[in-house]
Image: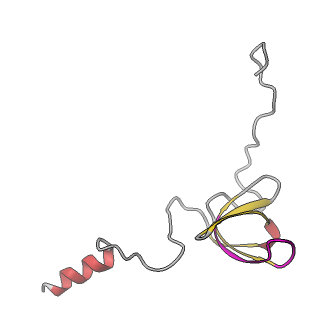
Amino acid sequence: MDKFGFPRTKPKPRQATVRGFRTGDLVHARVTTGKKQGTYQGRVAVRSSGSFNITTANGVVQGIAHRFCRKTQSADGYHYNFGGRDSSPTSAGAAGRSILAGI
């Protein structure tokens, strides 16, 4: 805001998707060139420039180009684990087994 109360910058763009990706999509990225070569799998945070941040199980990888990313699953409002099974004793599988064991 300036001294008269008017905004000094433009509003953020109202674009929901960037090159077919939305924030929260699960992606698989195979980077073949550049400093960040490798394979990454995780949740994407999109930028309007087309370069993304990917949150993996090991941390955040910044600046991955859209051309290296392939969408695994669209963001649907739920949170999914990146690896392995849920080993908590209250998981649905453990509860189902304990009920069946008592019959």
Residue span colored magenta: 32-43
> In front: 57, or 75?
57
The N terminus - image quarter: top right
Q: Which residue is at 83% across, 79% downward?
A: 32
Q: Is residue 61 magenta?
A: no
Tell me: residue 48, above or below residue 32: above
**Which residue is outermost to the left?**
103
Left or right, residue 61 beside residue 37: left
Give residue 8's quadrant in the image.
top right
Give residue 76's quadrant in the image.
bottom right
Left or right, residue 89 beside residue 65: left
> In front: 95, or 71?
95
Q: Which residue is at 61% across, 60% downward?
A: 24
Q: Is residue 41 magenta?
A: yes
Q: Which residue is at 26% across, 79% downward?
A: 96
**Which residue is outermost to the right?**
34
Model colouring: secondary structure
